[in-house]
Image: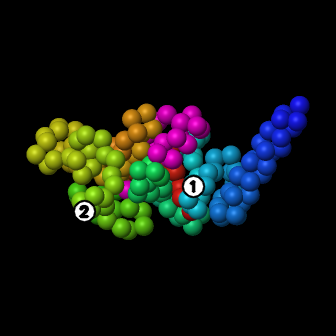
Amino acid sequence: MNALVILTTLSVWACISLADKVKDVCPDKVVKSSTKLLKVYNGTCYQFFKDHDVKKQYWEAQDECKRKKGLLAMPKTKEINQFLVNTLKEFKIKEPVFIGLDDIRDDGVFRWADGKVLRGSGVYHNFAKGNGILRRMSQWDPFRLMDDYDCVTLDPSKNKWVDVDCRRNLVQRISKWEKNRLFICEY
């Protein structure tokens, strides 16, 4: 009987501790809007967007994060990437989500949302075969002739990064060619 009481007490303490951690690390504006989809990892607050009515185009997702003083999530290490994948699975998010990595400015030069370039030997990346920096310009793909596959998603089912179409010109915005997706912000 005492063991049950101790477990219950520890469980309640753990819940309070996690809630306090979210409140301590995550911006007030973010905590007030949604506590269920917030997680803290290594001192960084992550907000996961799960509902289909919040799906956005890449540039809209960027703006949503910036509006709350954050950036699209940047899984710059294997550990952060695995944390994001595990949390997506925990929240039952099965589809690819936007992360803060793209090569919009210079094709083939991938930049994180904080402006740092992904390059150099030994730098962590998790691109699926034929995507991102693993894509060879010699690989002919009729669907990539205009190569607007400039934005990166994290696919939790494959635990890989996949580059996707994210055109921002007026014609594309009107026609909605770019697929709206879920996303993750970090603060």
Q: Position of residue 33 (x, y in %)?
A: 69, 54
Give the number of callouts.
2
Please name the residue shown 89% across and 31% down the image: 1
Residue 98 is one of the magenta-drawn residues: yes
Residue at label 1?
Answer: 41
Dot 2: few (<14), some (14–19), or many (≥20) neighbours within 10 Å?
A: few
Mark on residue 49?
none
Please name the residue shown 13% across and 40% down the image: 140
Which range of residues does the magenta coloring cover? 82-101
Q: Residue furthest front?
A: 2
Can I make out residue 64 in this image?
no
- Residues 129 and 67: in front is 129
Q: Please, what is the three-letter code of the amino acid marked with disc 2? A: Gly
Q: Residue furthest top?
A: 1
Q: Position of residue 184 (x, y in %)?
A: 52, 51
Q: How is the image coloured?
A: rainbow
Residue 6 is one of the magenta-drawn residues: no
Residue at label 2?
Answer: 120
Residue contact at pointers 1 and 2, CB within 8 angstroms: no
Residue 64's quadrant in the figure? bottom right
First reached walking from the N terminus: tag 1 or tag 2: 1
